[in-house]
């Protein structure tokens, strides 16, 4: 499967709370292109929603 992050970048620019780093932007873009329901990350803010996908920290109780 091939995907283009360029197709998702305009959506990242329009977000009210954009991610802090390029790596985080890449994770969010890849999850968006893959139609993920949620993002598991300890680096992004827990409960924050990016492009309709909530972030869950798997290490939070």
Image (tube, grey):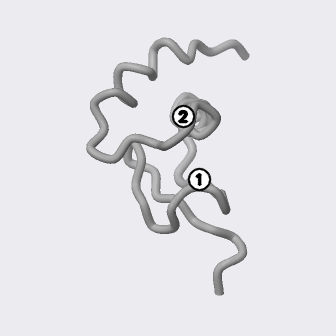
Residue 44, compared with residue 10, is above or below; it is below
Picture disc at residue 39: 1
Query: Residue 32 or 9: which is nearer the viewer?
Result: 9
Residue 60, compared with residue 28, is above or below; it is below
Identify the residue at horizontal 59%, vertical 40% (top origin). 24
Residue 11, compared with residue 49, is above or below; it is above
What is the quadrant of residue 3 in the picture?
Answer: top right
Q: CA distance from mark 2 to mark 1?
A: 12 Å
State the residue lying farthest toward the bottom.
Answer: 61
Q: Which x, y percent locates residue 34?
A: 60, 33
Identify the residue at horizontal 56%, vertical 56% (top origin). 44
Picture disc at residue 31: none
Q: How many marks?
A: 2
Disc 2 vs disc 1: Cβ atoms closer than 8 Å?
Answer: no
Identify the residue at horizontal 55%, vertical 18% (top origin). 5
Q: Which x, y percent locates residue 14?
A: 28, 30
Few, some or many residues within 10 Å of mark 1 (<14, 14–19, 20+): many
Query: Residue 39 or 59: which is nearer the viewer?
Result: 59
Asked whether, in this view, residue 41 is left or right of residue 32, the answer is right
Q: Quadrant of the N terminus?
A: top right
For marks 2 and 1, the one nearer the N-term is: 2
Report helix, strand or loop for mark 2.
Answer: helix
Asked whether, in this view, residue 57 is left or right of residue 14, the answer is right
Identify the residue at horizontal 51%, vertical 67% (top origin). 46
State the residue lying farthest toward the front.
Answer: 20
Residue, disc 2: 25
Q: Which x, y percent locates residue 49?
A: 40, 55
Q: Which x, y percent locates residue 9?
A: 44, 21
Depth check, mark 2 against mark 1: the one in front is 2
Q: Quadrant of the C terminus?
A: bottom right
């Amino acid at each position: 499967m091939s995907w283009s992050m360029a197709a998702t970048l305009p959506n990242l620019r329009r977000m009210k709370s954009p991610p802090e780093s390029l790596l985080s932007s890449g994770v969010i873009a890849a999850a968006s292109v893959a139609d993920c329901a949620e993002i598991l990350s300890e680096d992004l803010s827990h409960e924050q929603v990016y492009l309709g996908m909530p972030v869950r920290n798997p290490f939070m109780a």
